[in-house]
């Protein structure tokens, strides 16, 4: 059973959404009290969320000016997302070859658990189970270097990936794509597992980059 979403995690998602949508401009000051009011929270989770997003490159923290929206281009984001697509596709390919029968059964059980979450459109619970699903595949690759590189990119990009605009359809699409990844891994089809994982991540990546490029010119994240 997944833990309830914390206030900090909720603010991280909301801030990332506002940055991707162009509601917060590159270089714009991020005042803790104003954000606390905006997101109906106290200043403590706001402060924690700003530190989290700073570690992921979406916010900059300075001694004099405080927190600001980072200046990062859509092209830079596209490069990072493309690398993640390839690396996690490789994890899926290796997992199809190297996961034990017990690990594959556990992955299938996790996917089944996500079914109820998708039906309820419970996004916070889905995000927790989604992290477990992808993490299990990284572990199943049996390659620490590749798994760590993939996890690092996923952690850095997760606020951007979560800032999607597909609404209710989003979870159903992702779950169907997970089913294709799972099926390939269960039958030890390495090539199909790579293709299914890469396609899954590429769709989300395309949506993020499209939204960044579609933002009003003055609001685009730019270098």
Image (spheres, rainbow, N blue to C red):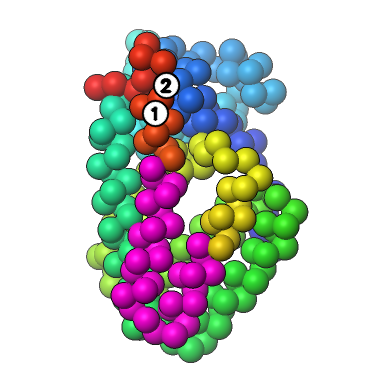
Report the disc number at residue 140.
Answer: none
The secondary element bearing badge 2 is classed as: loop
Q: Does residue 3 appear left or right of residue 100 in this picture? A: right
Q: Residue under circle 2?
A: 215
Q: Dots 1 and 2: beta carbons under 8 Å?
A: yes
Residue occupying image coordinates x 31% and y 30%: 74
Q: Assign the C terminus to one quadrant of the image.
A: top left
Q: Is residue 107 above or below residue 161?
A: below
Residue 218 part of the magenta segment:
no
- Reply yes or no: does residue 189 show up in magenta: yes
Viewer-side residue, 214 vs 105: 214
Is residue 99 toward the left or the right of residue 38 in the image?
left
Q: Is 191 situated above or below 76?
A: below
Q: Position of residue 172 (x, y in %)?
A: 61, 55
- How would you classify the magenta stretch by its main secondary structure? helix
Task: Identify the residue position indicated by label 1 in the image.
Answer: 212
Q: Please, is residue 168 above or below residue 211 in the view?
A: below
**Which portion, as a residue range, is magenta?**
177-206
Q: Quadrant of the N terminus?
A: bottom right
Q: Is label 1 in a helix, a strand or a loop? A: helix
Residue 194 pos. (x, y %)? 34, 68
Residue for point 64% across, 24% down:
39
- As drawn, which residue projects farthest toward the bottom? 101
Give the CA distance from mark 1 to mark 2: 6 Å
Taking 184 as reference, is 150 above or below it? above
Q: Residues within 10 Å of mark 1 (few under 14, many from 20)?
A: many
The image position of residue 60, as x and y in percent, is: 35, 24
């Amino acid at each position: 059973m997944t833990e309830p979403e914390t206030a900090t995690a909720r603010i991280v998602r909301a801030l990332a959404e506002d940055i991707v949508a162009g509601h917060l401009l590159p270089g714009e000051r991020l005042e803790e009290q104003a954000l606390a009011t905006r997101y109906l929270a106290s200043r403590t989770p706001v402060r924690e969320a700003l530190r989290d997003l700073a570690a992921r490159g979406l916010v900059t923290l300075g001694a004099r000016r405080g927190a600001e929206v980072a200046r990062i281009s859509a092209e830079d984001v596209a490069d990072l997302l493309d690398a993640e697509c390839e690396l996690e596709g490789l994890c899926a390919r290796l997992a199809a070859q190297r996961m034990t029968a017990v690990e594959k059964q556990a992955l299938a059980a996790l996917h089944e658990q996500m079914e109820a979450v998708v039906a309820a459109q419970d996004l916070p619970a889905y995000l927790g189970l989604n992290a477990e699903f992808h993490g299990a595949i990284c572990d199943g690759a049996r390659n620490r270097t590749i798994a760590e590189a993939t996890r690092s990119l996923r952690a850095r990009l997760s606020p951007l990936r979560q800032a999607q605009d597909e609404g209710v359809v989003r979870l159903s699409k992702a779950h169907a794509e997970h089913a294709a990844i799972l099926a390939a891994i269960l039958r030890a089809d390495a090539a199909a597992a790579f293709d299914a994982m890469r396609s899954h991540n590429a769709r989300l990546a395309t949506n993020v980059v499209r939204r960044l490029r579609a933002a009003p010119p003055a609001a685009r994240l730019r270098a």
